[in-house]
Image (spheres, helix red, strand yellow):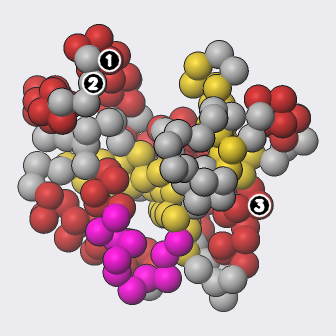
Amino acid sequence: MPGKLILFSAPSGSGKSTIINHLLKQDFRLCFSVSATSRLPRGEEQHGVEYYFLSPEEFRKRIETGDFLEYEEVYPGTFYGTLKEEVERILARGDNVILDVDVAGGCRIKEYYEGRALSIFILPPSIDELRKRLTGRGTDAPGVIESRMAKAEYEMRFARHFDAVVVNDDLGKAQEEVLHVVKAFLDQ
C-alpha cells in the first residue's frame, strides 16, 4: 500500500523541528524527505543526507523540467525545494513521508496530493513568546530576529489553510496532539 505525506509548516522558533523529531521516533513508518538546495554544503553536511546540493544552474534546469513539487528562491541564486522523485521514492516503498516546508510550499504539496497528505501548522502561543524563544536561542543578531518576526507574522496568516493547527504552548501536550492527529490520519 502506498504511503502518505505529513506536511509541517511553522514560523521559526515554534518548536516544529522538535515535534518532527519526536514523531520520527514513533512506529509510523515515517521517513523524512531530504530537500534540495543550490547553496554550498556547510561544515560536515553531505549530499543526500542533509540536502541534495545542486548548482544554481542545475536547480533552474530542474525547475524548468518540472522536477519540483515546490521550490523557492530564498535569496538571489539560492533555491530550496522538494523533489518529486524523493517523495515518490519513499511513497513507493510504502513508507510515509514527513516534509518540513514553508507555508506556500505546504499548500502546493497538499493541493498536489490532496487526501494522501495531512498538513499541520505549528503555532507559537503568542507573538511575544515567539520573540522570547528566538532571542533566547542566542544564535541570531537582532536584525535577523526582526526579519524572522516579520516572516512569522506573514506565515501565521496561512494557518487556516492547514488541516490541523497545533499551538505549542506546552511541548509535551503539542507532541501528544500531533501524535493523535497523525495516528488518526494514518489509520484511515
Mark 1 touching mark 2, by CB under 8 A?
yes
Is residue 42 rendered to the left or right of residue 8?
right
Q: Which residues are magenta?
A: 21-31
* Residue 52 in view, yes or no: yes
Q: Secondary structure at mark 2?
A: loop
Q: Which corner quadrant of the image does residue 87 belong to?
A: bottom right
The residue indicated by pointer 3 is 85
Q: Position of residue 25 (x, y in %)?
A: 34, 77
Identify the residue shown where x is 25% and y is 53%. 166
Q: Quick one: label 3 or label 2, which is nearer the N terminus?
A: 3
Front residue (pair 14, 48)? 48
Residue at the top extreme of this rendering: 143
Q: Which corner quadrant of the image does residue 108 belong to?
A: top right
* Mark 3 neighbour class, 10 Å CA radius: few under 14, some 14 to 19, many 20 or more: few
The residue indicated by pointer 1 is 144
Q: Quadrant of the N terminus?
A: bottom right
- CA distance for labels 1 and 2: 6 Å
The residue indicated by pointer 2 is 140
Amino acid type at mark 2: Asp
* Residue 153 in view, yes or no: no
Q: Which corner quadrant of the image does residue 86 belong to?
A: bottom right
